[in-house]
Image: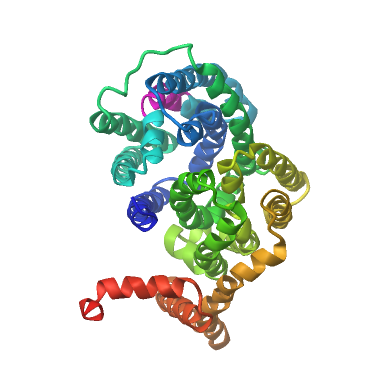
Amino acid sequence: MSIRRSLGISAFSQFSTFAINFASVIIVSRLLTPSEIGIFSVAASILAFAHVFREFGVGQFLIQAKEITRERLRAAFTVTLAISWTIALLLLLLRHPAAAFYDNAGVAGVLGLISINFVILPFGSPLLSLLRRELQFDKIALVNIVNALVASTVTVITAYLGESYLSMAWGAIAGNVANVVLLNFIRRGQIFMLPTTRGLGEVVRFGSMASTSSLLTELGSSAPDLILGRTLGFADVAFFSRADALRKMTLGQLFVLVRGVYFPSFAKRVREGGHPGEMYCSSMPYMIAFTAPALALLALLASPLILFLFGHQWERAAPLASLLCGFAVLSTSTSMVSTSLTAVGKVDVVMRAQLWLQGVRMAALASSLWWPLEGVVLAFSLAYVVELLLYFKALNVVFDVSAGQLWRATRSSYYLVLWSLAGPALVLAADDFLGLALPALFILSLSLPLAAVGWFIGIQMHDHPLKSELGLLLSRLNPRARR
């Protein structure tokens, strides 16, 4: 399957699941209070660490391995099964101490219910990794869409029926049951395998290195909920979560899309003799052309977006979202460095970079002992600068790519930021200068098309690499152009 076709199928899958999840978030945000969502957010942060241990790098191992035998697959299943069921037991045992730590019994309820998920997960996750290894993105798309549809439907129904913060846990369980049922039809005879002790060594060795890096990454992602939930309260956790939701729900889906294709493809090309530095520099202009303008636009339009999507009770999250998205633009050029390093086996470099980065983030979050949420978010956003510097160094040392080389390869993508923001900035300036107080929906209806037009103009004006790709797409869509 070609890269374009793989990305196309993955894009359809990601945007479909994004639309389903996005609709669910909007509905649930109006059914539940910030405090109820905050309880689940704290519990979900604890579960995020559990998921890192549960995965244990088994998925990456199966994708990278030169050959997948039945014995190797059974070994991977055994590791996943042992870890997942151990985590399920630990969640049951530790749910009440965790609830006592956060002084909220709801945390125990979520952890106890979601432990069921860890009993189910081992029967599906190794098979999803095999589908990725084999680049069967059409089947992966089917699994992901069904999962999102089932999980979102159950979440909304249970929230409406009064399950409160437990509704999202019920949705997650239902989604994973759907995964197992569907994968049983796709990969018959591989859902249930006998555990084995043969071949465990290589899985554990690889997994220990990969999971350490993943754990550090997850620490940075979950630390705001865990720390702020203790120092500032559940309502502030919810405001931070909604502020970061703009970035995660839009760019997060794009990163999942690209990394799902990029990781196995990059590893394969390196094995075939490709130069990783050249491949990184040639691929990033395409990535940055989407991520940098999108983040900048989210930063500019954070207020009308949050008011329109989540309602006036979340208005405090708007300036926080602007800070997080604005600073995130700085790290777009290094957004695929950790994936690239892992693809060539340099997990130790990723681990060291993450250790420094998460240390900075922890220090920023510790300021919540003295500062209000707004000051903490500003300090937390500065970690993007540290991330940029750390991965610039890694690129230079491992791939022999300097910051200057990367800038020359990607600068046309950053010019698109200015073109994309020009129209929306004029709309906001006119609204403020003339005192129109336009509704959020009206501002968005004007700004988003103007941003898209500016983006397309920028591609043409700066002869961006996407220009030829767009030309190819238009020629395929226009029958007359092919004659």
Q: Position of residue 23 (x, y in %)?
A: 35, 53
Q: Nearer the viewer, residue 171 or 35?
A: 171
Determine the image quadrant of residue 343: top right
Residue at 36%, 39% (x, y): give it.
134
Q: Is residue 372 left or right of residue 480?
A: right
Q: Position of residue 43 (x, y in %)?
A: 53, 33
Determine the image quadrant of residue 171: top left
Instruction: Tell me: residue 159, above or below residue 112.
Output: below
Q: Nearer the viewer, residue 221 or 137?
A: 137
Q: Position of residue 249 (x, y in %)?
A: 47, 53
Q: Is residue 272 left or right of residue 149?
A: right
Q: How many marks?
A: 0
Q: Position of residue 324 (x, y in %)?
A: 62, 58
Residue 442 visible in rendering: yes
Q: Nearer the viewer, residue 453 or 339?
A: 339
**If the image is split into quadrants, where does the C terminus sit?**
bottom left
Determine the image quadrant of residue 445: bottom left
Residue at the extreme top of the image, as rendered: 197
The magenta stretch is 112-124
Question: Is residue 200 magenta-colored?
Answer: no
